[in-house]
Amino acid sequence: MSSEGPHHLREEALPLLDGFQEQYSVHLDKFDGPMDLLLHLIKKNELDIYDIPIAVITRQYLEYIKLMKHLNLEVAGDFLVMAATLLQIKSRQLLPVDEQEEAEEVETDPRTELMRRLLEYQQYKEAGMVIGARALLGREVYVRTCSDPDLVMARNAEGPLEVSLFDLVDAFRVMLARIPAEHFHDVAADETFSIADCINEILALLQEQETVQFDELVKDEFTRERVIVTFLALLELCRLKLVRIFQGSEHGSIWFVPAVAGEPAPA
Amino acid sequence: MSSELSAIIECLVFTAESALTTDRICELLHEFERDAIKASLSELAAFHSGRSGGFDLVEVAGGWQFRTRPGLQEYVTRQIKTKASKFSQSSLETLAIIAYRQPITRAEVEHLRGVDCGAVLKSLLEKKQVKILGKKDIPGRPLIYGTSKEFLETFGLKDLKSLPTLREIQALDETPQYERQEELPLGQSSSGPVEGELPFE
Amino acid sequence: MSSELSAIIECLVFTAESALTTDRICELLHEFERDAIKASLSELAAFHSGRSGGFDLVEVAGGWQFRTRPGLQEYVTRQIKTKASKFSQSSLETLAIIAYRQPITRAEVEHLRGVDCGAVLKSLLEKKQVKILGKKDIPGRPLIYGTSKEFLETFGLKDLKSLPTLREIQALDETPQYERQEELPLGQSSSGPVEGELPFE
């Protein structure tokens, strides 16, 4: 990475990132994903995980991503998905609370799901460190490698078989890689339109137009399979908070828009 | 401590190619009482641990095995090439999630970690720490994963129940999303919706 | 008898792939005196022989080695029957072809593998992983093979549909779709296709 990186940073003065400025490279490598980064920010600022100041955390999170870009590091999509989630929570907090909805809104603090995920993630992160600190076979602890001569001599045909499914599939893969293509025709039934393909298609479409109608996606190929795949792709996009879905009336057309487009203007 | 039975058991465990379960030892030594065998095993383990020699008799992955005493690895690595069982933080996190939440799909692991886990999962499969248990009976039939016997061996765990307890999540009024999932079929009570048993014993 | 040096030596001999000569041990443990090492070795040998356990530390032609105590071989060989047998790469390949391409004839398997598979097929039939499904209705009426119930049990599968496809394993290497998405416009440089700036304060 370029040597001007750190100076550049100091000039830019990203004051909230003091932690990153010293040994930034170490820190950058350290985050295993958006959850890890969020936990770090919460700990560094001594914030209460049960009452996260979403504006502060969102700003720091986005500055961190900016920093990654300054350093020309590839920002993984997962970090962007979390950025969108944070912004969404923030925007929901900014919206005036509808009096009718107020009762429900009290229960569903938009931060609850994030808090729950963070707490759960933290548990597993800690559990991972605990198990990783054990005396590991082949690292701190060893077994006897020399086979007993009496055992080596004897041959065995009736013992239980020891092999994993992964070994089996892998053997198949290795063999397929070895044989010429014409010897082999794949008869697997899944030579079809995948959910992943469909997600790509929807994302491409959303770059061209602001809203997309569900029917529009399936009109060319109105098959049961295509409808299901499209629907699952939409659900996935929704889960990733990349689109928002609307339905005008009961059983009416389903419309969707990119999730970030609806954010309020900068404060 | 030097009864004939102890010597026989020690000899069996010493020559076995992998950990020997108590059941298998009893099966092999059908002329001896199960209780006597179990008592001998405990005595042997205590004896080796007490003498602080180069190796201990430990219970791991549901069986018994002689293993070098932790702390001596510096000397061992002088003569043998280690298989370098290195685990990155992300492997350990992923492994922890799979261990505590199995059977689990890739999507569920990724939801918990917030990142793509394909590469990590594949490397754990290659290291045989994780295995494919089958497919989940939901749309798309995703593969479900669990930890393997090798996982218990690598981490020196007697069984899944010996995993360190997760730090309690306090002050949560609602159950976390994943606790609504089927319970981990630990021990005898393997009645989960996933076919077959977990591969222990 | 439980000096650190003894423990280290014991650990070295225990993990060695073959007998260790005294010279080799001294070379590995260069920080210790040769005399001390030799004394420790004799002490260790006397200790193990005195306790009449399952194994002794003996000096054989090539050097020092732990050996099971003579007279216990009978028990050692009892476990051979329960020794887990592993698949060779060629068995595994053949089995994989049959699993994924069944029903299949021997000629078809051999066409794919490019080698004669008679012996491997026979051993898979003996291990009951594969069974004969019938005869194919083509000239010569060759036998057709498929996997057995035992095959499903070996791999812990509910049914053949639960067999992971090659594509599912390959999918582990693929990056998730949204990573290929257009970048979110962060900060000032909002020139992406998504309109509007993100709300920085």
Image: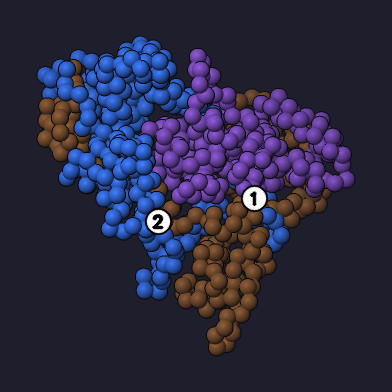
Chain colours: A blue, B purple, C brown
Location of residue C8 (image quadrant):
top right
Q: Residue at x 55, y 88 (%)?
A: C139
Say which mark, if any, is on residue A65: none
Image position, residue A66 (x, y; %):
20, 27
Q: Name the amino acid type tagged 1.
A: Ser
Q: What is the distance, in whole Å, between disc 1 and disc 2 at their CAs?
A: 59 Å
First in sequence, mark 1 or 2: give its number: 1
Q: Answer few, some or many: residues within 10 Å of disc 1's Cα (few below 14, many 20 plus, some between 14 and 19).
A: some
Image position, residue B197 (x, y; %):
65, 45
Using residue C130 as the reference point, say whether residue A191 is left or right of it: left
Location of residue A87 (image quadrant):
top left
- Residue under label 1: A147
Residue C9 appears in view: no
The quadrant of the image that shows the N terminus of chain C is top right
A109 in relation to C157, above or below = above
Residue A127 appears in view: yes
Location of residue B39 (image quadrant):
top right
Q: Check if mark 1 and mark 2 are on a common chain.
A: yes
B99 in relation to A202, above or below = above
Q: Residue at x 66, y 26 (%)?
A: B52
Secondary structure under tag 1 reads: loop
Q: Name the amino acid type tagged 2.
A: Arg
Q: Nearer the viewer, residue B164 or C86?
A: B164
Secondary structure under tag 2 reads: helix
Q: Nearer the viewer, residue C196 or C178?
A: C196
Q: Residue at x 50, y 14 (%)?
A: B171
- Residue under label 2: A224
Using residue C5 as the reference point, say whether residue A101 is left or right of it: left
